[in-house]
Image: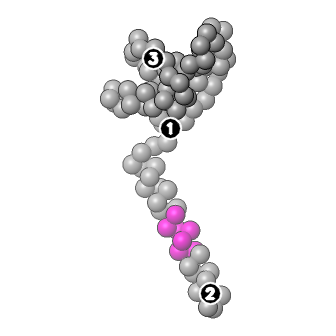
């Protein structure tokens, strides 16, 4: 196979992946998580959807469970895994949007 044909295929594949990534961002922006130190909770994780804060979660010292608190809610649900806590916050945040 000639070198130019291989280069064209690689370039086309790269352009296709960039296009797919752009479309995915337009349809569903990424969720981001950052963390701050809190005097009461230790490390407090914040889950963002773009510029919107969806909620916070932390690991409870007393039982090691993950406590999820969606924004604009008094809920403080406890989960075995960090992923479960994140999913609750995302689901609640999408209902509120």
Q: Quadrant of the C terminus?
A: top left
Mark 2 crowd level (few <14, some 14–19, many ≥20, 10 Å Cα): few
Res 54 label? none
Asked if residue 58 shows in the view, the reply is: yes
Q: Which of the 4 image quadrants contains residue 39?
A: top right
On the picture, is 96 further left or further right than 2? left
Taking depth in this image into account, of 95 and 63 the one nearest to the observer is 63
- Name the residue: 43% across, 19% down: 71
Secondary structure mainly formed by the magenta segment? helix
At 38% from the left edge and 31% from the top edge, which residue is drawn?
91
Q: Which residue is mark 2?
A: 4
Magenta-colored span: 11-17
Front-most of residues 40 and 12 = 40
Residue drawn where x is 56% and y is 19% of the image: 65
The quadrant of the image that shows the N terminus is bottom right
Q: Which residue is mark 3?
A: 77
Tell which circle, 1 or 2, labels the residue nearer the N-terminal end: 2
Q: Where residue 43 sits: x, y (%)? A: 65, 19
Q: Identify the secondary structure beneath mark 1.
A: strand
Mark 1 highlights which residue? 31
Label 2 secondary element: helix
Q: Residue at x 59, y 13 (%)?
A: 63
For the residue carrying disc 3, how many other residues have a C-alpha within 10 Å: few (<14), some (14-19), or many (20+)? some
Q: Is residue 67 magenta?
A: no
Q: Position of residue 44 (x, y in %)?
A: 60, 19
| Residue 33 vertical placement versus 8 (above, below) | above
Q: Is residue 93 visible?
A: no
Q: Is residue 16 magenta?
A: yes
């Amino acid at each position: 196979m000639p070198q130019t044909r291989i280069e064209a295929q690689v370039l086309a594949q790269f352009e296709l992946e960039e296009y797919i990534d752009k479309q995915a961002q337009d349809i569903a922006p990424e969720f981001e998580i950052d963390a701050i130190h809190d005097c009461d909770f230790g490390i407090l994780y914040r889950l963002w959807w773009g510029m919107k804060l969806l909620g916070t979660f932390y690991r409870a010292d007393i039982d090691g469970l993950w406590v999820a608190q969606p924004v604009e809610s008094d809920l403080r649900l406890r989960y075995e895994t960090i992923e479960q806590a994140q999913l609750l916050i995302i689901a609640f945040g999408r209902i509120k949007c």
